[in-house]
Image (cartoon, grey):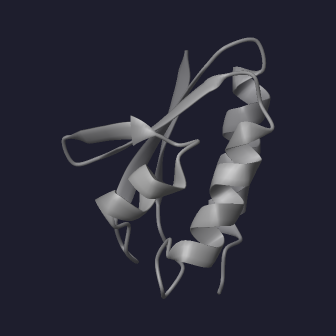
Amino acid sequence: MTSKVVKIVNPTGLHTRPGNQFVKLAKEFEADVTVTKSDKTFNAKSLMKLMKVGISQGDQIEINCDGPDEEDALAKLTEFLANLTE
C-alpha cells in the first residue's frame, strides 16, 4: 500500500467535471484507490462518493493505493490533482 497527502489547489476544488476525470483515471488502474478527507474515507472510483465528501480548494486529502500498479496509480492521480486548474 502506498499513499500521499495532496493539497487541492484548483480554485473550484474537485467539482463534478474534474471529479469525473479523477474517477475515470482511478478506474484505469487495478489497484484499489481510496481518498481520505478529515475522518472520511471513500472509494475514489465512485463519483457519487467523491461528490458527497465535497473537496474544496485548500483541502488536504490522502490518496491511498493498494494493488499491483499502486505506485503508478498514485503518481498519475497526484499529478492530475497538481495540474488541475479548471
Front one among 28 and 68: 28
Q: Which residue is outermost to the left?
A: 39
Tell me which residue sits at (63%, 76%) in the image.
17
The quadrant holding residue 60 is bottom left
Tell me which residue sits at (38%, 66%) in the image.
55
Horizontal and vertical percent position of residue 72: 79, 31
The quadrant holding residue 16 is bottom right
* Rendered-image quadrant of the C terminus: bottom right
- Horizontal side of 53 relative to 25 (left or right) equals left
Quick check: 9 above or below 35?
Answer: below
Horizontal and vertical percent position of residue 84: 67, 74
Quick check: 48 above or below 64?
Answer: below
Q: Which residue is outermost to the front?
A: 48
Tell me which residue sits at (31%, 58%) in the image.
53
- Horizontal side of 71 relative to 34 (left or right) equals right
- Horizontal side of 27 relative to 9 (left or right) equals right
Total number of numbered labels? 0
Horizontal and vertical percent position of residue 71: 72, 26
Front one among 17 and 36: 17
* Rendered-image quadrant of the N terminus: top right
